[in-house]
Amino acid sequence: MIHEVDDALRELVRAEALGGGAGVDVVFDAPTRDWAARRNTPTVNLYLYDIREDLGLRSRGRRNVYDEQGRVISRTLPPRYFKLSYLISAWTQRPEDEHRLLASLLGCFLRYSALPGERLGAELGLTGLPVPVSIALPPPENKAFTDVWSALGGELKPSLDVVVSAPVVAAPVYPAGPPVEEGLSVDLSDLSKPVPPPSGVPAPAPPPGAAAVPRPRAARARRRSEG
């Protein structure tokens, strides 16, 4: 995923910020003091200095995976986004030329809220998800660009901070059950049959007005003998 973002940024910078990139190198090296001393051509440096998850784009639940007929065949967890922070700087012999390059880079990235789909690689393109990009936003409280330059051991230079939020689809896949092909049917025929009382429970008394049940002959004979 990271290498695909690198390729997309390189192509975007060469095609739209540098007008084809003739005479200007686009590199991803750490802009240290030693690197700056070895450089001998105009260069745009896109240094990846920070990788962390974009918690603002995290979502929960599961996503359905469909086949060509539109049936759910499996479910998976939603992708997680990771912020790739690039420190972009321009290197020439004259500060004025560096400023022109930075202005061109700024205008290039301001035209896009996400990386163009035609410049995405296979992994990012197959997700079908946008790859948001932002430029020159104020740094959070726990991050300062001066600290980055100090860690690199170089002198502070004007630079642009570009942040790309790339989706990563690396979650387990859960198979789904077969689709339902028949409608629901309910059989109510058993409701018309009387339910016998459980064993040991006396039968309920007949309702008022119900016809009397004739007594057995033995019971009538016993009453005559007692009378």
Image (cartoon, helix red, strand yellow):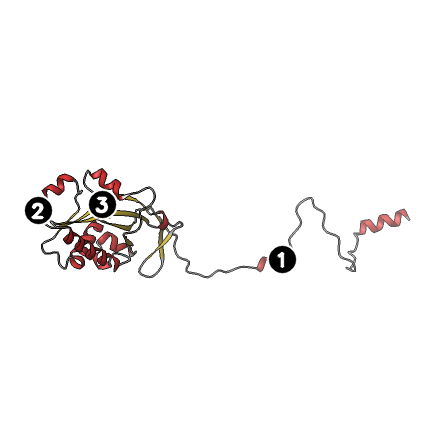
- How many residues crowd around disc 2 within 10 Å: few (fewer than 14), some, or many (20 or more)? few
Q: Position of residue 7 (x, y in %)?
A: 18, 52
Tell me if residue 76 can be seen.
no
Judge by depth and name the residue closer to the eye, 119 or 103: 103
Q: Is label 2 or label 1 in front? A: 2
Q: Secondary structure at mark 3?
A: strand
Instruction: Residue at 13%, 41% (x, y): give it.
Output: 35
Residue position marked by numbered label 3 in the rendering: 48
Judge by depth and name the residue closer to the eye, 64 or 207: 64
Of the residues shown, which amino acid type is indicated by label 1?
A: Lys
**Left or right: 143 as drawn, with respect to 44:** right
Residue position marked by numbered label 2 in the rendering: 40
Q: Position of residue 181 (x, y in %)?
A: 41, 60
Q: Considering only order in the chain, which callout, 1 or 3, is on the residue closer to the N terminus?
A: 3
- How many residues crowd around disc 3 within 10 Å: few (fewer than 14), some, or many (20 or more)? some
Instruction: Residue at 79%, 53% (x, y): give it.
Output: 215
**Left or right: 19 as drawn, with respect to 60:** left
- Tag 2 near tag 1, CB within 8 Å: no
Of the residues shown, which amino acid type is indicated by label 3?
A: Leu
Judge by depth and name the residue closer to the eye, 67 or 227: 67
Q: Secondary structure at mark 1?
A: loop
Cα separation, mark 3 vs mark 1, equals 78 Å
Q: Where on the picture, by quarter, is residue 156?
A: top left
Q: Considering only order in the chain, which callout, 2 or 3, is on the residue closer to the N terminus?
A: 2
**Left or right: 18 as drawn, with respect to 200:** left
**Which mark is drawn over residue 193?**
1
Instruction: Residue at 15%, 56% (x, y): give it.
Output: 14
Judge by depth and name the residue closer to the eye, 226 or 39: 39
Tell me if residue 48 can be seen.
yes
Q: Position of residue 196 (x, y in %)?
A: 65, 51
Of the residues shown, which amino acid type is indicated by label 2?
A: Asn
